[in-house]
Image (cartoon, coloured by chain):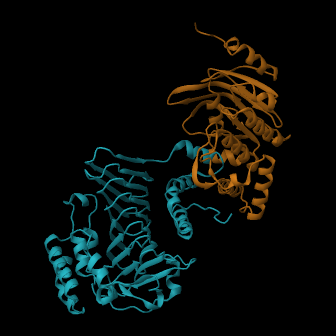
């Protein structure tokens, strides 16, 4: 059976296992119908021209994983940012692991989507925000239909999350192949601040496909810093769908670090519904082998006096492929918009490919929008400089690539995250640096 | 130390060096002067091993070894150092980390273990004090946002740390004000020993007031047309290059 048919027929069984809830049930029912109509994206869709899901959709994924309890903290410590105190939401094969997590309801709610969807206390938040900005699409609708578990984060008005929150989804080898569909909701009220680190990590060599949807709402003057660490095994693929709505004077940044996985697609959309909003989208991609990473971004400037900053860097080795498709849409009303986009790539091998497609659609006349895209090799003069200091050419290349990628990290606000990413970049590029010196 | 005989070199089939002869002995300071486009910087790049130049004729022997077949890093391991006219910026790599990488690469090539961290720090501290380099400077990204003077001083700092046998200073004086020039020249003078040598590439005589050469060569159109003592530099300053130019086309 095709995966699509299998998923549709699994939906009834899935629904029966849930506590009945009229409003969310209606959303799910509509979503499965939408998925049935739309299906998975294919290369005929303009947004999927350079990314084919065929290879990852051919597996017979399990949709209802068994509970796996054998994971201990020592097994997963290395995947956590463990040298600082954090709230942790750990999911194993899509199921919440209480003994590996640390939740809170003090000033902020850091808890489970499954509770939020079923408990009356969270009802107003769910009614206001759940599935409100994720646009109808095959993948979003599929996730919505099966939405059950994930992170629910609500930072109340004038509160500062006192420590960062980590959301980590592990896949174990319990099933021969596994489809995971985490669903996250982040609501940050007025004048509040939160930092979130998200990771998807497979612990098995069996195929894993994650189709994740995250909705983030930043109210007036809210600050949200979101870090996505994508360094998964070669058997794991990720489709990350993240949608962000911002109100007046809010400031949201998303950093995406893509170093691993078989196929990674990041759909990252910002909707600016207010004035004096700041949106930052940054990414570093370093891949090799036959890996594929696709960044598909949208910044929708709807109202005046807002800014957006996009800076994506990619290093592609072997026969890896990259895609950057960055759309900036400036509505007629969005005067005085300042939108900046930059995509720089290094092809480290002859067989590596990057497809870079900046799209600017500007309907306002008083704006400052810029975009730049480069694809190139390393600067020979710089390599000669390093070699003349006695650094062998291979290491010199690594050092240059490290320097190329590294400056995206300047805007990372959690020092431990910055340090970890620095180390990941250095080890990816086989650069030895004395970080403690 | 360095023996160059009848060196010819080209870039994309255009001959730049047209038969250079040069011999530098330990303890000596040589200066090469010449008008723009005479091939001075090309000569320094060719000695350091820049690949885009093709050596078409002649020989370059450094301490008995043929340089022709060596990569730039191998030449560096042998003790050749080139101070760049335009040092390259490397964001995200601190001066200290860069020096550590360079030193350990050299040691590895010599079959030695990495230098212990405390020894490295001590050495870096000593040399930075010698060149009056601020400690904060060491944690900045290499050459990024450095002023012209800071870049050149950083080049001499690397020279001090790597302790080469032959240092080639390519237009190290360009873009420096007189105070920065004095600091850089002082640094070079402090590093002079009986067993090392310096090759200065310069357009102007003023650097040679501070680093006094044993031999001055005049290079015109890819050839050394005249060699002499330090007084030759003064003569060039006063009279320009025309009088040494052999066959000036009118």
Q: Is residue A430 above or below residue A59?
A: above
Q: Is residue A295 above or below residue A359?
A: below
For the image, the number of numbered tags is 0
Q: Position of residue B50 (x, y in %)?
A: 59, 39
Q: Nearer the viewer, residue A25 or A368?
A: A368
Residue B116 at least partly seen = no
Q: Nearer the viewer, residue A112 or A159?
A: A159
Q: Give the farthest residue toward the right.
A: B194
| Quadrant occupied by the C terminus of chain B | top right
Q: Residue at horizontal 78%, vertical 35%? A: B182
Q: Is residue A324 above or below residue A371?
A: below
Residue B150 at least partly seen = yes
- Chain ID, cyan in image: A
Q: Give the farthest residue toward the top.
A: B250
Q: Colour of chain B?
A: orange
Q: Nearer the viewer, residue B214 or A310?
A: A310
Residue A289 vs residue A433: left or right? left
Q: Position of residue B36 (x, y in %)?
A: 61, 23
Q: Is residue A388 above or below residue B178?
A: below
Q: Nearer the viewer, residue B145 or B100?
A: B145
| Quadrant occupied by the N terminus of chain B | top right
Residue A411 vs residue B88: left or right? left
Q: Position of residue A120 (x, y in %)?
A: 30, 89
Q: Quadrant of residue B28?
A: top right
Q: Position of residue A121 (x, y in %)?
A: 33, 88
């Amino acid at each position: 059976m095709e995966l699509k048919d299998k998923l549709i027929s699994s939906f009834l069984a899935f629904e029966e296992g849930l506590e009945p809830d009229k409003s969310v049930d209606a959303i799910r029912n509509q979503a499965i119908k939408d998925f049935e109509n739309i299906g998975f994206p294919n290369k005929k869709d303009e947004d999927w021209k350079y990314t084919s899901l065929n290879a990852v959709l051919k597996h017979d994924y399990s949709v209802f994983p068994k509970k796996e309890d054998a994971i201990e903290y020592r097994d997963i410590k290395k995947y956590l940012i463990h040298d600082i105190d954090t709230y942790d939401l750990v999911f194993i094969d899509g199921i919440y692991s209480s003994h590996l997590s640390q939740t809170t309801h003090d000033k902020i709610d850091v808890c489970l989507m499954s509770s939020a969807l079923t408990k009356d206390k969270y009802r107003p938040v769910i009614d206001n925000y759940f599935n409100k900005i994720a646009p109808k699409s095959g993948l979003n609708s599929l996730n919505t239909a099966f939405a059950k578990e994930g992170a629910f984060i609500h930072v109340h008005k004038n509160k500062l999350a006192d420590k960062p929150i980590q959301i980590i989804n592990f896949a174990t080898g319990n099933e021969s192949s596994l489809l995971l569909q985490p669903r996250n909701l982040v609501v940050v009220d007025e004048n509040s601040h939160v930092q979130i680190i998200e990771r998807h990590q497979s612990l098995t060599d069996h195929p894993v496909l994650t189709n994740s949807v995250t909705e983030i709402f930043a109210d007036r003057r809210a600050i949200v810093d979101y870090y996505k660490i994508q360094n998964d095994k070669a058997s794991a693929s990720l489709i990350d769908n993240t949608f962000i709505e911002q109100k007046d004077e809010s400031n949201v940044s998303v950093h995406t670090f893509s170093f691993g996985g078989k196929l990674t697609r990041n759909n990252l959309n910002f909707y600016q519904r207010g004035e004096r909003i700041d949106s930052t989208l940054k990414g570093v991609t370093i891949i090799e082998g036959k890996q594929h990473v696709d960044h598909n971004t949208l910044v929708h400037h709807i109202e005046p006096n807002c800014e957006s900053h996009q800076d994506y860097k990619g290093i592609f080795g072997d026969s890896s492929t990259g895609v950057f498709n960055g759309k900036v849409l400036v509505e007629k009303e969005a005067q005085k918009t300042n939108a900046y986009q930059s995509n720089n790539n290094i092809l480290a091998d002859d067989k590596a490919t990057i497809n870079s497609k900046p799209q600017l659609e500007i309907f306002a006349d008083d704006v400052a929008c810029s975009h730049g895209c480069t694809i190139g090799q390393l600067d020979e003069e710089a390599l000669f400089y390093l070699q003349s200091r006695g650094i062998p050419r291979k290491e010199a290349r690594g050092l240059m690539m490290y320097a190329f990628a590294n400056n995206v990290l300047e805007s990372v606000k959690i020092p431990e995250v910055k340090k970890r990413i620095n180390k990941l970049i250095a080890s990816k590029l086989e650069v030895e640096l004395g970080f403690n010196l | 130390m360095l023996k160059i005989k009848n060196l010819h070199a080209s870039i994309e089939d255009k001959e730049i060096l047209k038969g250079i002869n040069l011999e530098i002995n330990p303890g000596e300071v040589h200066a090469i002067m010449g008008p723009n486009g005479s091939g001075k910087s090309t000569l320094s790049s060719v000695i350091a091993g820049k690949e885009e130049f093709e050596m078409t004729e002649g020989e370059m022997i450094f301490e008995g070894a043929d340089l022709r077949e060596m990569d730039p890093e191998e030449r560096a391991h042998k003790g050749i150092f080139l101070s760049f006219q335009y040092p390259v910026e490397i964001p995200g790599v601190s001066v200290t980390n860069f020096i550590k990488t360079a030193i350990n690469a050299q040691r590895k090539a010599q079959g030695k273990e990495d230098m212990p961290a405390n020894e490295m720090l001590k050495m870096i501290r000593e040399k930075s004090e010698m060149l009056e380099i601020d400690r904060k400077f060491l944690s900045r990204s290499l050459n990024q946002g450095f002023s012209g003077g800071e870049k050149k001083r950083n080049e001499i700092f690397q020279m001090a740390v790597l302790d080469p046998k032959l240092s080639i200073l390519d237009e190290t004086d360009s873009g420096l004000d007189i105070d920065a020039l004095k600091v850089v020249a002082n640094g070079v003078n402090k590093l002079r020993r009986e067993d090392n040598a310096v090759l200065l590439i310069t357009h102007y005589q003023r650097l040679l007031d501070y680093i006094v050469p044993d031999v001055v060569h005049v290079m015109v159109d890819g050839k050394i047309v005249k060699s002499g003592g330090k007084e030759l530099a003064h003569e060039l300053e006063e009279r320009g290059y025309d009088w040494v130019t052999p066959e000036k086309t009118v």
